[in-house]
Image (cartoon, rainbow, N blue to C red):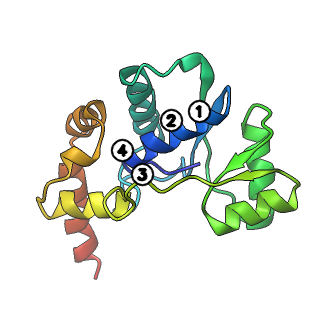
Amino acid sequence: MGRFQPLHNGHLEAVRKILEENDEIIIVVGSAQSSHSLDNPFTAGERILMLRSVLREERIDLARCYVIPLPDAEMHAVWAAKVIAYCPPFDMVYSNEPLTRRLFEEMGFPLGSIPLFRREVYDATEIRRRMLADEEWRSLLPSCVVSLVDEFDGVGRLKALSKSDKKGD
């Protein structure tokens, strides 16, 4: 599960690791209802395109991968049930997020941890900050995702959102 705002090389390493241990993966695109904000600049559709493009570019068998958009739940207590309702059946949950782990553990699911690959660099918040500051960010994303961010004018969108956010202060 992730927001993929944007998808970066750390996300790609997590997918590879999970697929080393499992026949299939369900990639949940969280906060699917959110877009066009500083924390969530990309739409669910754009994030799904990022995922599908990188899976193809990396020659990961798409038959082993499900990509499911999932809107947030209004209450934490029903969120795990919502994940189950939106996804094909699964028997393990990979997450490092404490609340997610707790909710699925309470439902009896075994949990896997995702090794954080160079987390100090591969962090979407840091990548969005670099985009806004005109600092180098392209090397942190798979090349096909860089092309999509350019196609969506992701940097321009972030900068416009930043300007409109400052007007609201």
**How far apart in space, not on screen, are marks 2 and 3 (Cα)?**
27 Å
Instruction: Decide which of tag 2 and tag 3 comes sooner along the chain.
Output: 2
Type of the residue with mark 3: Ser
Where residue 20 is drawn, which disc sits there?
A: 1
Whether 19 is drawn above or below 156: the answer is above
Residue 72 seen in the figure: yes
Secondary structure of residue under mark 2: helix
Query: What amino acid is labelled 4 in the image?
Result: Asn
What's the CA distance linking mark 4 and mark 1? 17 Å
Q: Which mark is residue 9?
A: 4
Q: Earlier in the sequence, mark 2 or mark 4?
A: 4
Which corner quadrant holds the C terminus?
Answer: bottom left
The residue type indicated by label 1 comes to Glu
Tag 1, which secondary structure? helix
Q: Which numbered tag is attached to residue 159?
A: none
What percent of the width, then of the height, locates residue 119? 39, 61
Is tag 4's residue or tag 1's residue first in the polypeptide sequence?
Answer: 4
From the viewer's perspective, tell me whether residue 67 is left or right of residue 84.
left
Considering only order in the chain, which callout, 3 or 1, is on the residue closer to the N terminus? 1
Q: Give the distance between the C-alpha atoms of the residues marked 4 and 3, in whole angstroms.
A: 21 Å
Frontmost of labels 2 and 3 is 2
Q: Residue at x 37, y 59 (%)?
A: 123
State yes or no: discs 1 and 2 in contact (Cβ < 8 Å): yes
Q: Which residue is mark 3?
A: 35
Asked whether, in this view, residue 48 is left or right of residue 94, the answer is left
Reading the image, the residue beneath label 2 is 16
